[in-house]
């Protein structure tokens, strides 16, 4: 809204709420990356890449209904990462533990010192801390048993 006679913009309540919401969303995404980095004793950039890789693979392996249910509980910017590059028409690949791990590894990149199973389990533990128990149970139950072993039950 312009101040009368000056042509200057005056911040409105909607402007400050929007700025606050964006700052909060960024803070939540940063918190998730920081937690994962701490859990794995990694730098934030690598933790963020891993989170993105696991979320993309998980998204592509869930049913559309389960994918949407999980996304509803993700923080706004993390939800954006989750849906980044999503192609709903893309057929899901084989759903074995090995294929899941390969998909994450291909997306994350190969680093010899990274125990990818441990890294994937760390992302799942992060989700356990931030997503409702009921939703986690639904997601786990929608996965093949061999893949569930990567998602440790607490």
Image (spheres, rainbow, N blue to C red):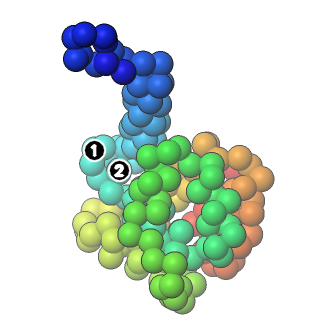
Q: Is residue 49 left or right of residue 80?
A: left
Give coordinates of residue 74: x percent, y percent.
Answer: 56, 49
Q: Mark 2 highlights which residue?
A: 47
Snapshot quadrant of residue 53: bottom left
Please tell me whether mark 1 sits on a helix, a strand or a loop: loop
Residue assigned mark 1: 43
Q: What is the number of the mark on residue 110? A: none
Q: Picture coordinates of residue 62 (x, y %)?
A: 61, 73
Q: Is residue 102 visible?
A: yes
Residue drawn at point x = 27 percent, y = 69 percent: 109
Q: Are marks 1 and 2 in contact (CB under 8 Å)?
A: yes
Foreground residue among 62 and 42: 62
Specify whether 138 is left or right of 58.
Answer: right
Residue 31 visible from this viewpoint:
no
To which quarter of the image does residue 67 belong?
bottom right
Query: Where is residue 91 shown, x and y percent of the image?
Result: 52, 88
Q: Nearer the viewer, residue 87 or 27?
A: 87
Residue shown at the point (68%, 67%) measured from the top left = 66
Mark 2 lies on a secondary structure that is helix
User: Does residue 33 appear left or right of residue 148 in this picture?
Assistant: left
The residues bearing labels 1 and 2 have C-alpha atoms spaced at a distance of 6 Å
| Tally of marks | 2
């Amino acid at each position: 809204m312009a101040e009368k006679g000056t042509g200057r913009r005056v911040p409105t309540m909607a402007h400050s709420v929007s700025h606050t919401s964006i700052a909060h969303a960024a803070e939540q995404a940063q918190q998730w990356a920081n937690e994962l980095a701490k859990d794995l004793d990694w730098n934030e950039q690598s933790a963020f890449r891993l989170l993105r890789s696991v979320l993309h693979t998980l998204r592509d392996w869930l049913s559309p209904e389960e994918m949407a249910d999980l996304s509803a509980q993700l923080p706004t910017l993390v939800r954006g990462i989750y849906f980044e590059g999503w192609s709903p028409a893309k057929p899901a690949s084989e759903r074995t533990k090995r294929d899941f791990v390969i998909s994450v590894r291909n997306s994350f990149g190969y680093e010899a010192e990274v125990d990818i199973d441990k890294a994937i389990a760390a992302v799942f533990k992060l989700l356990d801390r931030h997503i409702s128990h009921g939703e986690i149970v639904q997601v786990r139950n929608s996965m093949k048993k061999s893949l569930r072993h990567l998602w440790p039950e607490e």
